[in-house]
Image (cartoon, helix red, strand yellow):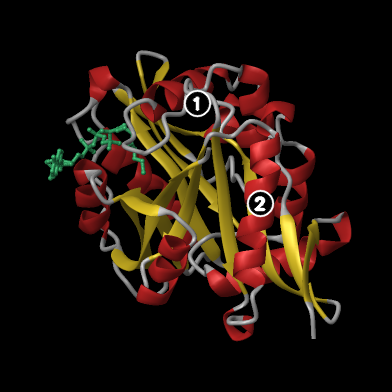
């Protein structure tokens, strides 16, 4: 039984997504989203996913690429997940080493990998030369049985809309997403400066629900938003909540996210997921207010190349 690692092929989308969902059930993934991410990636991102295969079965996956939207060049990432019942066969190490070689070829100098916070995973990363950095939590909210905070009256100068209302011109949402992203704590600084890339990677992403994404508008401009993804089943995920700097601290993030969650529950979604850097105190406070509970923690691991 030999484990091999090879490039992802379009027909792997189904098994790639299945392994990801088994290894990381808090993140939404579908075969369509896997295929879309590969075919619509920015050329500078050098996205080149890998699979580990044993006897024709995909047992491990790696997402690899360069954080091309970071002002710091050479920052590569590799996120490796092995089927929980196929661990200990060498798939993880082989995926990491192959990804590292590929990333070095495209001039990566620093590598980042998310590692679920369990002793075996952390030991694995440390043995391969990675050191722990920031951590982040996955949070889950039971929409079917839990209770949401009641809707509050919308302030007189605020209007609640959905992303679908911006279908003719989503640029104001791009601008708000770009501004708020700058303030999200993270090891890798990201900047959205390329509107066409944002349209492809965010706006047209197959998991983004324009209908369930809520936007709080003040003076005709988006001031806060909560961006929702859905997986075609009953799972809903928030990919970003943000409030323009000038409008923070007046409850607009809570307002937008509560609107989205109430509408998601009414539409039949039963579970809500999100992820927050463990140092993002305002967002963790907001999610606690909604009733989200931490369901897993992952630790970013870093390795300097060369
Ligand atoms: C996080 C963010 C969305 C909050 O937006 P906001 O509109 O100011 O949020 P709200 O006013 O609705 O609620 C903020 C809550 O956080 C609490 N809060 C603020 N700073 C806090 C801190 N340091 N520690 C704990 N709680 C804090 C406030 O007290 C408030 O709760 P309250 O209503 O009980 O007073 C905004 O700061 C932002 O855009 N940050 C950058 C983007 C980001 O990190 N988004 C989250 C990505 S996962």
Residue sitting at 77 percent across and 51 percent down? Answer: 35
To which quarter of the image does residue 152 belong? Answer: top left
258 left or right of 13? left
In screen coordinates, is 106 left or right of 87?
right
Question: Could you classify mark 2 by the number of other residues whose Cα lies within 10 Å: few (under 14), some (14-19), or many (20 or more)?
Answer: many
The residue singled out by tag 2 in the image is: 99
In the figure, 297 relative to 282: above or below? below
Q: How many marks?
A: 2
Q: Left or right? Give the position of 12 relative to 79.
A: right
The residue closer to the viewer here, 245 or 298, is: 298
The residue at 84%/82% (across/down) is: 55
Q: Is mark 2 within 8 Å of ligand 1?
A: no
Q: In the rendered image, is residue 29 in sight? A: no
Location of the N terminus (image quadrant)? bottom right
Residue located at (32% from left, 28% from top): 183
The relative height of residue 83 versus residue 68 in the rendered view (above or below) is below
Q: Name the residue tied to disc 1.
A: 70
Nearest to the observer: residue 293 or residue 41:
41
- Asked if residue 50 is positioned above or below residue 203 in the image, the reply reads below
**Residue located farthest toward the top when viewing the structure as drawn:** 219
- Numbered disc 2: secondary structure: helix
Q: Quadrant of ligand 1?
A: top left
SS category of the residue bearing label 1: loop
Q: Is residue 178 in view from this perspective?
A: yes
Q: Label 2 to label 1, Cα distance in Å? A: 20 Å
Q: Position of residue 93 (x, y in %)?
A: 60, 66
Instruction: Looking at the picture, tell me which residue is in the foreground, 220 or 141.
Output: 141
Query: What is the x, y in percent for residue 29?
Result: 63, 59
**Which badge, 2 or 1, comes first in the chain's sequence?**
1
């Amino acid at each position: 039984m030999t484990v091999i690692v090879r490039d992802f092929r379009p027909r792997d989308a189904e098994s790639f997504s299945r392994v990801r969902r088994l290894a990381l059930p808090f993140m939404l993934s579908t075969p369509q989203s896997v295929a879309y991410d590969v075919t619509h990636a920015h050329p500078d991102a050098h996205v080149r996913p890998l699979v580990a295969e044993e006897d024709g079965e995909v047992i491990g996956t790696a997402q690899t690429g360069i954080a091309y939207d970071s002002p710091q060049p050479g920052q590569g990432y590799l996120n490796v997940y092995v089927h929980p019942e196929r661990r200990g066969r060498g798939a993880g190490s082989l995926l990491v080493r192959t990804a590292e070689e590929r990333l070095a070829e495209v001039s990566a100098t620093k590598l980042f990998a998310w590692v679920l916070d369990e002793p075996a995973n952390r030991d694995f990363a440390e043995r391969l030369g990675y050191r722990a950095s920031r951590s982040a939590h996955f949070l889950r909210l039971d929409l079917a049985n839990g209770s949401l905070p009641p809707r509050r009256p919308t302030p007189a100068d605020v209007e609640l809309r959905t992303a679908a209302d911006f279908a003719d011109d989503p640029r104001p949402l791009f601008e708000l997403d770009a501004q708020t992203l700058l303030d999200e704590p993270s090891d890798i600084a990201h900047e959205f400066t390329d509107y066409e890339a944002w349209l492809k990677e965010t706006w047209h992403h197959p998991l983004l629900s324009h209908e369930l994404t809520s936007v709080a508008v003040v003076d005709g401009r988006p001031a806060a938003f909560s961006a929702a993804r859905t997986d075609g089943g009953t799972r809903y995920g928030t990919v970003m909540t943000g409030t323009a700097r000038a409008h923070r601290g007046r409850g607009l993030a809570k307002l937008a996210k509560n609107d989205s969650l109430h509408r998601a529950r009414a539409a039949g979604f039963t579970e809500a997921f999100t992820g927050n850097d463990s140092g993002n105190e305002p967002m963790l406070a907001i999610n606690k207010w909604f009733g989200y509970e931490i369901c897993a923690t992952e630790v970013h691991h870093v390795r300097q190349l060369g």
